[in-house]
Structure formats: C-alpha cells, structure tokens
Image (cartoon, grey):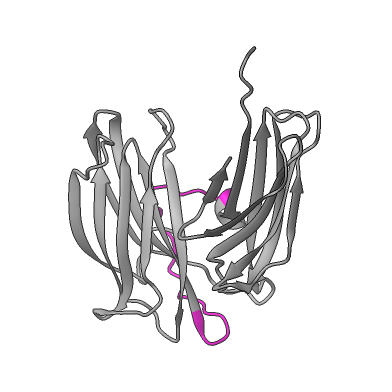
Amino acid sequence: MRKKHALVLISLLTLTLLLTTPHFLPTATAPEPPSPGPGPVYHWKIMLAQRACNAWIEGVLTYQGTPIEGTEFFLECICELPEPQPLGQFVFWKVPTIDVIPTDIEYIKYIDIDKDGNPDIIEPISGFLDFDDPTEPHTWYQHLEEGTGPFGPWMVVVEVREQPYHEDRPFFEWQLTMKTHGLPLGASVSGILTKDEVVVSTEYNLMTVPGVDPDLQCQVVRTKYCTVPNDIHLSLLINDMGPPINIDANITQFPWTYRH
C-alpha cells in the first residue's frame, strides 16, 4: 500500500509585500520625507533577502549612534528549497519609532555561502539612512553583497524601508494563507493575532474545499497602523485526522509559516 502524504501549510504575510517583492536594483526617484502617523509614530521595515546562500542579521536602528528602544531585530533567511532559485527568498520585520527618525542601522551580518550551518562571512555594519537620495520610494538604506559559491552566483540584500501613514488607510493588512495537499476531506483553521497577548485582529477562518486537492485559501485581516502582531493563535482541524490541533506561536519575522 502506498504511504499517504499530507501537507498543511499556513502562512502569514503583509499584503503589501505579497504584491511587491524586492527588486534588488536601485532606481532614480524623487525623495519623499518620512510620513508619520498620529503620535507622531514612524514605521520602519527591515528586510533581508538572499539567493543561493543562507544569511541572517542581528541589530538595531539608532539615532546619532544611540540605539532606539524597541527597534531590535533578528532576521534569518534560510533556503530549504533546491538550488538554483533565480528569485531568491526574503524575510522582514517591522518596528515603530515615536517622535524620532532613525539616522543609522547597526547590525552584524552572517552569510553561509555553502549552507553547512557555519557562516563564511561575519561582518559588523553601520549604515547611514539616506533621506536625500533613496534607492526607491521610501527605501532609505540598501546594502548589497554578492559573489560566487557552490550553488552559483549568490547575493544578500539588506534594506530599511518606511511604511508611510495615509489617513484613508489607517491600518495594516495581513494575509493568511492555507494550502493543503493529500487531504481529500479538506481542513480548516481559525484563530486570532495578538501583540504581547493582546488581541489586535479580527478572527480569521479558512477552510479548504473537500474533494479539491491540492487547495489554497486566503483571508486578509487588519490591525491598526503601527500594530505588528508578535503572536499567532490558531486551531487546525484536519477532517480525517482526529481532534483539532491548537497552536500558540511567537512571531519574530515575516513571512511566518507553519507546516504540518
């Protein structure tokens, strides 16, 4: 008898990033000053992307050399898929600053070119946020490093982007995606997003269609502007595999993914 293989894949990603992935190429743009929300609160997106290697960074945003509280980040971009991957992968985190615009980003960069778990490059970096000559609209910092390794030409990109405030859209949107494979009776998932255990989103409910295999379902939920969830609570029911599976997970970067 052939062994049955089943997969449930649940992902959480900001909707804007789902629609616009990094270009990795500088473009000529007219500078636009940072646009804060009420407070004033500024919102910053730290992004790490890689191709044909593994990479991770750890650091903080600073103001004239002084770390800004609450802007610490750790991003890990690990490629589990076969190479080559012409488009690479990316991860990101989002942090607010209140009544202050960062002047610099300080971080340590680790690059594992041969993917053996040990970094081949370890480098502390101090980068200036250039508000006079952005590489793209609202992209105030970009650092590119590239070379050639056992998986072909590799590349690592670090960016700092601002998410400006718009009065007609005073919220963030988050897309939840559930994909199933090998489950003819389907599955369902429901839950909420929280920040420091405080509910920040409406409840989400996703259900794949019985008889459709594979199947993909999506739902968008909102949080207030500058509200980034750091926990996800969900109940997963696989229709032919027993009682619901309850999951409470900490989120440290996006996209967040759960596989079962």
Instruction: Give the answer, above or below, for where 30 lies relative to 179.
Output: below
Instruction: Give the answer, above or below, for where 25 lies relative to 213.
Output: below
Q: Return the residue nearer the eye: 188 or 202.
A: 188
Tell me which corner region of the image, top left, top right, bottom left or bottom right, holds residue 60: bottom left
Measuring 25% from the left and 55% from the top, which residue is drawn there? 109
Q: Return the residue nearer the eye: 35 or 32.
A: 35
Q: Return the residue nearer the eye: 112 or 104.
A: 112
Horizontally, residue 54 falls left or right of residue 228, namely left
Which residues are drawn in magenta? 18-41
**Magenta stretch containing residue 20, yes or no?**
yes
Q: Quadrant of the N terminus?
A: top right
Instruction: Give the answer, above or below, for where 81 lies relative to 121.
Output: above
Q: Quadrant of the C terminus?
A: top right
Tell me which corner region of the image, top left, top right, bottom left or bottom right, holds residue 37: bottom right
Horizontally, residue 37 falls left or right of residue 93, namely right
Horizontally, residue 258 falls left or right of residue 216, namely left
Measuring 30% from the left and 61% from the top, which residue is drawn there? 58
Instruction: Give the answer, above or below, for where 141 lies relative to 63.
Output: above
Look at the magenta stretch and give its main secondary structure: loop
Q: Residue furthest right?
A: 210
Measuring 31% from the left and 38% from the top, which residue is drawn there? 53
Q: Is residue 129 visible in this depiction of the protein?
A: no
Measuring 22% from the left and 43% from the top, which residue is drawn there? 118
Q: Position of residue 145 (x, y in %)?
A: 26, 47
Q: Position of residue 105 (x, y in %)?
A: 30, 68
